[in-house]
Image (spheres, grey):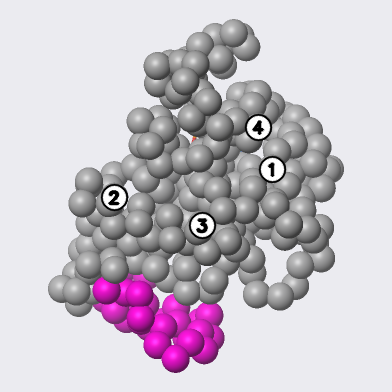
Amino acid sequence: MNSILEFQNVKKIIEGKPILKNISFVVPKRKIVAFLGPNGAGKTTTLKIAAGLLEHESGQIIINENEKSLYKSTNPVMFIPDYPLLYEELTGFEYVEMMIDMFQIKKKNPYESLYRYDMDDELHKKVKDLSLGNKKKIALFTTLLSNPSLLLLDEFISGIDPINMKIIKAILLDYVNNGNAILLSTHQLEVAQHFCDTLILINNGEILEDNLSITLVTENHSTLEDYFISTLKTNGGK
Ligand SMILES: Nc1ncnc2c1ncn2[C@@H]1O[C@H](COP(=O)(O)OP(=O)(O)OP(=O)(O)O)[C@@H](O)[C@H]1O
């Protein structure tokens, strides 16, 4: 099996307006896929549909080779929004404990990989007093506890300093190398260029490019930003 997520002609209408116009794309196994597009292109809507948080009008969504409505086992797809919603009054540690209970994590030591997040002292603070970077690290740690095969990240890599970015990158790389995949929406093209394997480009609810190698893009354009701007221009801007 090579793909973890497949959208086939998925259509979404909101308030009578077509937001996704029969979109099709694939997220392959063991890849970090950059989901790129201008503001309002349809990225968050797509991620929410893939996560099961929004319904779609027509088309098929295949996850791990099962049609979405059929999957029943532990949730294979997890979504982290641009601003993680955590319980602000709990300490970081209490929040982690609560999620371990909630997901009924049966691992011998669910805290085993927590050291990688380098949060020792921070976990004793209330979530509301943590920096955005540390909130994102807690969201990532607790999300990965349930062993999803697909991680959907909406603007996750913004607002993270270079040290935390290095930590997060290493964790996410190990995650995909273990046979999983990530679909990551971002406007930070420089980060995407060095972090992602392939890209999907969406504009105005239509897929302009699917499964395009970022190495190939940067061979033909000086940067991902250059590719993004010129491709959108060719396709009539926003
Ligand atoms: N609940 C809603 N009601 C009305 N319109 C909506 C709703 N949700 C999304 N839209 C519209 O759908 C379109 C796509 O929105 P979406 O948030 O998916 O875009 P995006 O690519 O994630 O944008 P951004 O990069 O700015 O986050 C936009 O025109 C947006 O206004």
Q: Secondary structure at mark 3?
A: helix
Find the distance from the CA under tag 4 to the CA under tag 3.
19 Å
Residue drawn at (34%, 42%) of the image: 158
Which residue lies at the image location 84% right of the left edge and 43% below the top edge? 58
Which residue position is annotated with label 3? 176
Q: Position of residue 127 (x, y in %)?
A: 28, 68
Q: Are marks 4 and 3 in contact (CB under 8 Å)?
A: no
Relative placement, left or right, of 229 versus 9 is left
Q: Point out the frontmost of discs 2 and 3.
A: 3
Whichever of callouts 2 and 3 sits on the residue coming sooner in the sequence is 2
The amino acid on which the numbered mark 4 sits, given as a three-letter code, is: Asp
Q: Considering the numbered disc 1 on the image, is that residue within a helix, a strand or a loop?
A: strand
The mark nearer the N terminus, 2 or 1, is 1
Q: Are marks 4 and 2 in contact (CB under 8 Å)?
A: no
- Amino acid of disc 2: Met
113 part of magenta stretch: yes
- Alpha-carbon span between mark 1 and mark 4: 7 Å
The residue pinned by badge 2 equals 165
Residue at (55%, 37%) from the top-left corner? Answer: 198
Mark 1 touches mark 4? (CB < 8 Å): yes
Q: Which residues are magenta?
A: 87-115
The residue that mark 4 highlights is 210
What distance separates the C-alpha of mark 2 from that of mark 1? Answer: 26 Å
Of 75 and 130, the residue lying toward us: 75
The reply to whether the C-beta atoms of the residues labelled 2 and 3 are less than 8 Å apart is no
C-alpha separation, residue under disc 3 versus residue under disc 1: 15 Å
Mark 4 or mark 3: whose residue is earlier in sequence: 3
